[in-house]
Image (cartoon, coloured by chain):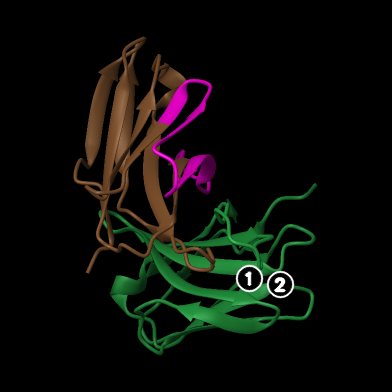
Amino acid sequence: DQQVKQNSPSLSVQEGRISILNCDYTNSMFDYFLWYKKYPAEGPTFLISISSIKDKNEDGRFTVFLNKSAKHLSLHIVPSQPGDSAVYFCAASAWDGDKVIFGPGTSLSVIP
Amino acid sequence: KAGVTQTPRYLIKTRGQQVTLSCSPISGHRSVSWYQQTPGQGLQFLFEYFSETQRNKGNFPGRFSGRQFSNSRSEMNVSTLELGDSALYLCASSPQTGAVPGANVLTFGAGSRLTVL
């Protein structure tokens, strides 16, 4: 039973355009949501997070939107750059944050 | 500040053997989590330790076990290896205590790539 879902295994975007990565979750107990980026042969690195009391959080080119009623969040990257090509993981945890559940990931390719 | 260190980086084992993987967290981080990454499955949660106690466990068989030492270093062990255990095993540490709610930002190591033949 996958509690965090990323239904698009891959996404290709032209450089300079917007990349939108989607994530759905099933557990209503999740309070915090995070996005991680992973390059080959490296561990995932933290990008941005959002708590369930907010609907938007922005950090430079990265913005995360949360629709709690739909149990859906998305990561927007504007403008997309070739260096953004990586696998992006959506993750979620309850209020205590001890156990972080990850989705299967979306492989983003930004084409120059 | 040194990052999360995992050893060994690569290893090859045969079915039926056992393996022990090691993780040294960032200094001061007391929470250590382990994940298994396989193609298409993303990062599957194995377990999380804090102050030498396992606080959370994922849905893996009892062949997968772990422990944490007083210096926060952690090890995970897989016994009676199966072909399906071939994966990248990732360790992550965080300062999260659970006493204060907040987003648990994990810092990952580069992983240990296990191949079972």
Q: Quadrant of residue A20?
A: top left
Q: Write down the residue under mark 1.
A: B22
The CA distance from mark 1 to mark 2 is 8 Å
Tell me if mark 2 has few (under 14), some (14-19) or many (20+) residues whose alpha carbon lies within 10 angstroms of its own: many
SS category of the residue bearing label 2 = loop
Please name the color used to draw chain B: green
For image coordinates 58% across by 52% down, the residue present is B105
Tell me if A14 is positioned left or right of A33 in this view.
Answer: left
Which residue is at the front of the view, B115 or A99? Answer: A99
Is residue A100 placed above or below A80 in the rendered structure? below
Q: Which residues lie in the magenta part?
A: A38-63
Callout 2 amino acid? Arg
Q: Is residue A6 magenta?
A: no
Tell me if A34 is positioned left or right of B104 in this view.
Answer: left
Is residue A22 placed above or below A14 in the rendered structure? below
Callout 1 amino acid? Ser
For image coordinates 44% across by 73% down, the residue present is B46
For image coordinates 42% across by 16% down, the residue present is A81
Residue B73's tag is 2
Is residue B71 placed above or below B24 in the rendered structure? below
Residue B19 visible (yes or no)? no
Location of residue A39 in the rendering, given as x and y in whole percent from the top left corner: 46, 38
Quarter of the figure that contains the C terminus of chain B: bottom left
